[in-house]
Every structure is written in structure tokens, then in C-alpha cells.
Amino acid sequence: MTVSKLSIRNARRQAGDYLVYFVTIVLVASLTYAFNGLVFSQELLALSRQMAMVPPMIVFASIVVVGIISWLVAYTTRFMLLRRSREFGTYILIGLENEQVARMFFLENLAVGGCALCLGILLGNLLYQALRAIVLALFGMSYHFSFFFSGKAVALTLTYFVLIYLSAQLKSRRKIRKMRIYDLIYLERQNEREVVKSGRGRRVLFAGSLVLGTLGTLLLLTGDLAACLTGACLVIFFLYGFFISFASGVPAFFEKRPARKYRGQRLLVFRTLTAKLGTMGVLMASLALLFLGTLAAEGMGMVFQGMFQSRTNKNNCFDLVLAAEDPKVESYRDSKAYIAEKIPLKEDREYEIYLMDTDKIMAYTEVHTMYYRYYGRDAVMKESDYRALRAMLGYEDVACKPGQYLIHCLPYMADALQGFSEELVFGDASLTPGGVHTEVFAQHLYDYGNGGDFILIVPDALLEGYPVSHTMYVAMTREPVSEAQYKGICTIRDQIFEEREDPLEDSLLYASDMDEAQAASQTAMSVFPLFYLALVLTMTAATILTIQQLGEAGRYRMQFALLWKLGMDKKEMRRALRMQFAIYYALPAIPPVLVGAPLIRNMASQVEPGTMVGASDPLAITAMALGLFFLIYGIYIVLAYSSLKRSVLPE
Amino acid sequence: MLQVQNIEKYYGSGNHVTKALDRVSFEVEDGEFVAIMGASGSGKTTLLNCISTIDTVSAGRILLEGENIAELPARELARFRRERLGFVFQDFNLLDTLTIEENIGLALSLTHSDPGKVKAKVEAVAKKLGIEGILMKFPYQVSGGQKQRAACARAMVAGQSLILADEPTGALDSRASKNLLEIMTHMNQAFGATILMVTHDAYSACYARRILFLKDGRLFNELLLGEQSRSAFYHEILDVLALSGGDISDGI
Ligand SMILES: Nc1ncnc2c1ncn2[C@@H]1O[C@H](COP(=O)(O)OP(=O)(O)O)[C@@H](O)[C@H]1O
Ligand SMILES: [Mg+2]
């Protein structure tokens, strides 16, 4: 048996004893590799120029991940050193030098980390295919398997892991070198100290932290930057204050209320728990903070996703749209000429959007929806244009019945507008409502578009003499608009604008394909890193909680063996263990959920009206973020419970 | 072989100083089997730890084969522990990842001695201690008595000249204790191992040939087995304990 052989054997044991930790490192490695694959994928980055923003964002997220995982590794390494101090002491006692023991531990961790990394990269290849499928779907392309292996992605992942392990290993190496046998053999472990001792101080801290927590959450909900920063600080204070005071306060609570203490299995459950929690206050608070970070990242990711998705859904019907107040301006004219010359079209049409002399509908929608107005008066278009456009888009034909007008609007205001029953007067004709339509119709192009979120449609003759708001030119192309074509138009426009003193754009250019590509790129660049972070945060916190819990296995086993002898039956023991688990894992999750849920809902509600609808509804997003969090957390809890149950309860 | 000269040991600092050892001096010759007896808290473990280089003394000197262990550099100290000292603890201190055989052979193999001979050496020692049948098992698969015998084997497999045992029978039942003590006696007589054993139990102590009594960190008496029978020696020990206030040996 040599040092390295012993290291390998210990590594195998470590991977078994700290299986949850090992699995987490494997998963983190695979996530890191998969995202690094994205950074180096020529195929995906070539999908759009906008995709160039994806690699820096992912590298940035990776740096945060490296920080968090370094903490996890350092924490676990320290935990193992403490747990195994006696073992290390024995090595030194039988004549190993500290240096040799340090090398042994280093080799052991190298083996574990190396295996995790290799497995992670293998798994990461699968995960990368999943990411690739998502990206392709975002760009509306179909997935087909194509093998991908990037040496650069491996190298970058390896670099991250060296960074992660280096600091923890150097620290533990220094520690082992300085260790004295006496400390190793006789000081089995030194735990965190209770920070607050006196009852009064504890109560003040507890009450104070609750107040700060409520205040902080309210400040976070204001949406104002300074208030949010203050709120975030207060919430951090709250978490630490709460956990420090709560954990050490529970034993005191039950000391004063013996009747409650002796009810059912409470004594057992709470004694075991408080022994643990009393010394874990600071750690619990840090973990709660990680959970809050998870929820915030997931919520933000879903809000972004909803925003980008719905933005294209409001406009992406015509392949190309041009619009200008004055169709004679150079930018409009030249763009149109370029399209006519360079892009093969299936169909196109030029038409006017008019303004009424009242704002009745806008006033109504402002009251009944969260509408934000773009124009001074209600926008309206000719029935003939409307019908031609519907035909162009392949929508079912509709016509104004005599004496009626139609409304076409974004889905979010449809319900409200169904209830609009007023007559509208055009010259000497007066029209009644004839129906509401909600197909995608380029209605969210700010100052331009087919109205701002809604438009009226009336028989052509009635609009004689009404003022024109702007001219629209829409076209359906034979092929999807390519990036080169789009860039061609943009170059013309940019030249025109640059030559002016006042580079204000006097016309609008919109291309559905480009908008979709942009939304896809923006999703990839913001949503991916956020979910990457969220996953890593949850896994880190759940791993640390589980390591702590499994570290108590020996004590639990002795306790349950004794209780069994004392006549407690197995069903009751299982119940006690379950209760212990439930409380232990619920505790660090409750405060973050209480703060995080309103925060996510609020974030989703801050977005423009009509955006967060359907699956992106604020409530739905909150539910999904919580669901995702509890899903991953739950997996860890179930794993920990099943492994502890097996090793702790007597046969 | 071992000279302990006027050693003192303090724990703590400032106002909370505990004097665990107070000017303790004695000598152990080659091939002796010495027991140190004392009540719980009298300083036995502290004394043993100081001798075994696990702990350091506050004052005084400890010479092992003429060398002051306080002056040895760390590397020498490691070698010293490896080659000269064997340890037996109350709670065995075997590594549960290793089989009994590997536990015994670990120090040998880690010191780059000829790997081909390790197994043979381990087997030879195991046979002497009657544990050759459990060599392939892991510590959690064998009884306390067997574990302690494995610890003894580990303590002497490298030809260590001084075996230090801290309450080796503390975790064993009376039959296993008797067995272990007989084996230690055998180690001492047949292989010439020098043994220094710490105990609070008169029955264990009477297997030694000389007994030092420790109370509140000081040596206060010494008994020799001489030519008398073991049971006479046992009663003599009980007399000393009774004289010293009777609180030394609980459990009798
Ligand atoms: N690490 C320590 N710190 C402070 N006091 C100690 C420490 N170890 C032992 N002592 C004290 O020193 C005295 C002797 O302890 P010890 O040698 O363990 O006694 P024994 O082994 O005879 O039971 C006791 O009073 C004990 O409380
Ligand atoms: Mg002792």
C-alpha cells in the first residue's frame, strides 16, 4: 500500500460518503461544459450577429459560478477535515509526516475532482445537445443531432475547475501541515459558536430582523433602484438576524414550555434539530440567501423570456414593415426602393393609417386595461386595406357590416373592448361596434404600426378628409429575410441619418425574421445565464444542507438504536425522522420564499401591459419559479432522506 | 530506554491554568512492563501523550534512548514514531477503510520497506497474537477484543521498542480484557517489547511487573511484582488504593 493507493481508496470512500457532493460537482461540471460549448459553438453563434453577446454573458455567469462552487468545495473540504481529524491524526501517529498526509488528502481530492470533471464532461455533451435544441427552437429551426465536442470548451471547463479546487486545496494543505496530532486526536470537532447568548438580546434581534425583513421586502417591491438596494441590504440583515436568533432561541422556547416539549415525538425531534441548528445560524442564513438568489434569478429569467417572446408575438406577421409620417422622406423612399430591387417579394401593399377626431377608445382602454397611449387620438384604417392585409396574412376574411366598425387589437385588451358599446361618428355617419379581432397584426411598433395596440376599421369612404397619421408599407417575401439583406437596408438608412445634424430616424424598418432572431439571441444571452446560476445556487445550498445532515448519521444511528431498545416502534421512528427532515429542510427555504414570491410577481407586473400573459402571467411565473426551485430541492431532500433512512433506522 | 525527568504540564492560560502533571520523574528499562495507575483526571493520559510525542511538556525533559524528544525536528519525530513507538488506545483507533491486515501493515508499507515482505511480517505478528483468521476483515466486522489485538499487532509490527497503551482494556468486557492482558504479557516476555500501560483498573494493572501511582499529577507510590503471585500483587494494589483515599479505582 502506497500513499497514492491509499489516496485512491479514500477517494472512493469520499465519493460514496459524500455522494450528494460528488453528484453536485458532476452536475456543475456538466452544466459548465454545456454552456462553454455554447461559447465555442460556431454553428449556434452563426445563427445571428446578436448571438455574439451570448459568450460574454455566459463567461460572466461562469465566473459567479466559479465563486459559488469554490465556496462549496472549500466548505466541504473543511467539513471533511474536521470529520476525519482522528483519521489524519492516526496517520501521523503511526509515523507519517504532515506533509505526506497533506499530499495524500490532496491526491484524494484530485482523484474525486478529476472523476467528477470527466463524468461531468461526458454528461455535459448530452446537456449541450439539449441547450442546442433549445437555441435552434428559439430560432424556429428544427433540431437534428450533430455530434459536438470542443477541446476549447473542455479547456475552459478545466480552467474553471483548477481555479475552484486550487484555493480550497492550498488552504487545506496549509492546515494539515500545521496540524498537531494532539488537536487531531482529541478535538474531534469544533463547531460554530452560538453567536447570541442572552435571552433578551436574542428576542430583540429576532423581532428586529422580522421588522427589517418586512421593510426590506416592501422596499424591494417599489422598483426604485436606491430603494431596491436598501431593501436588499435589509433583507440580508433580516436573514442573518433571523437565523442567528431563531436557531438559538428554539431550545429556550421549549425550556419554558415543558408541556409542549413532551408532546409526542417533539422532544426527540427538537432536541436533535436544535443541537444542529443552534450552531448553524450563520450557515443557514447564507443558504437562505442562496435560495433567495435562486428565486430571483429564476423569476428574472422567466420575465425576460416572457418579454422577448411576447414582443415578437405582437408584431411578427409581415416579413417586412416600413413606416413613415411622410412617405417622401429619403429613408423611407430609399428603403422601399432597395426592397423592390433586391428582395424577391410574394406580395406587398402601401396604405395609410388615419387619426380620428376623438380619443374615446383610448380613454376607455386606459380605464379598463393597463393601456399606455401612443397617439393623441384613436387610430383608424380603411376596410379595403384591412381586408387586403388579412388576405396577405392568410387570415379569415371579415367585412364591416353596414353601419358598423371593427376593432383589431392585442389580445390583452380584447375582453375590455368587447364591452365597448359606444357609437362613433364619422362626418354624418354614426357607427356601432361590429366585433373585435386579435390576430397578430404589427400593432406594437411604438409611434408606427397598425395602431398602437389597437386600431379601428371603417368603410373607406368615411375616411375621406381625415388626417393621416403615417404611411405603412408591408411585404411578404419569398424567402426569409437574410441578415445580409437586412443589413443592406440598414446601411442605406444609417448613411442617411449620419449625414444629418440631427440623426433622428424619420421612418421605421421592421423585419420579423430579424426580430425573432434578436429575441432568440436576447433570450439565450439573458435567460440561459440566469437559469445556469439558479441551478448552481440551489444545488450548492441543498448540497451543504445535505452534507451537514448526513454528517450526523452516526449520532442518529446511535440515538435510534437506543430508542429501539427503549421500545419505540419503527413506524414512530420513521415519523420522527421525517419530521426532523421536513423542519430541517423547510427552515432555510421559508424566508426566501416569503420574500421571493412577491418579488417575482412584482417583477413580472412591472413589465408593459399585454406582455406577461398566458404562461408568462405574473402568477404563473411565480408558481413556475417556485415549482422549479422545489423540484430540484426536493430531489436532494428525497436522496438525503432515503440514504439516511437506510443507514440510521435499526433493521 | 525511557527517562522522564521532572516534567510539568499546564493546560490553559491566564487565570484558568490546570496543572495536569507536577514534577513527574521516573525511568523505564528495556524489556519492562510498567503500569501507571491513577483516578480519572489524575494526568495519566497527559503523561502518556507527552511521552508519545503527541503532546509537549511545559517543563522538564523526556529522553527516549538517550535522545531528548523535544529537540527532534519534525521529520525525525515522524521517523521516531514510525520505528520506535507503538500505540494502543482505549478506542482502538483503527482506520475503518482498511482491512485488519492493511491496518497493521500500513506504517510498514508507507515507509518504503520492501513491499514483498510486508505481508509476511504482518502475518507473522498476527499469528503470534492469534488474529491470523481475521486479517481480511474490516474493523467493523470484528469484536472489540480482536480490534485491540490488531492494534497491538500494529504497535509492534515494525519492531517498535516501546509500546504505549492508554487504557487498552477500557472498552472491552472482562474476558476480552483478560485475553488482551495475557497477550501483552506474552509480547513483553517472549518478544522483549517494553510496555508502558496506563489504567485506572487494578485488575489490568496487576499484569504489569511494576506499578507507578499517579494522583493529581504527582507520582506518590511505586509497587513491584517481585516474586509474589499475581493475586497477592492484586491485593497489594488494592491496599495502596485504599490508603490513598480509595477513590482511584472505580469499577471494582
Ligand atoms: N486539553 C486540555 N485542556 C485543559 N485541561 C485538560 C486538557 N486535557 C486534560 N486536562 C486536564 O488535565 C488533567 C489530567 O487529565 P488526563 O491526563 O486526561 O487524566 P486521566 O487520563 O488520568 O483521566 C485533568 O484535570 C483534565 O481536566
Ligand atoms: Mg485518560
Image (tube, rainbow, N blue to C red):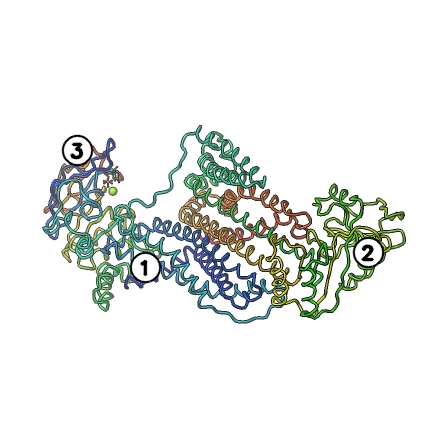
Residue type highlighted by circle 1: Leu
Q: Residues within 10 Å of mark 1 (few under 14, many from 20)?
A: some
**To which residue does mark 3 refer?**
B243
In three-dimensional space, the C-alpha distance between marks 2 and 1, rounded to whole angstroms, equals 89 Å
- The crowding category of the residue bearing disc 3, from other C-alpha atoms within 10 Å (few below 14, some 14 to 19, many at least 20), is few
Nearest the eye: A462 or B210: A462
- C-alpha span from label 3 to label 1: 46 Å
Q: Nearer the viewer, mark 2 or mark 3?
A: 2
Q: Quadrant of residue A511?
A: bottom right
**What chain does badge 1 belong to?**
B
Q: Which residue is mark 2?
A: A382
- Residue displayed at 11% across by 50% down: B67
Q: Position of residue B16 (x, y in %)?
A: 25, 32
The amino acid beneath tag 3 is: Leu
Label 2 marks which chain's residue? A
Quarter for ligand 2? top left
| Structural crowding at the residue carrying mark 2, measured as other residues with C-alpha within 10 Å and reported as few (<14), some (14–19) or many (≥20) | many
Residue corresponding to mark 1: B98
Q: Is residue A221 left or right of residue A407?
A: left
Above or below residue B201? Residue B176 is below
Q: Residue at x 74, y 54 (%)?
A: A470
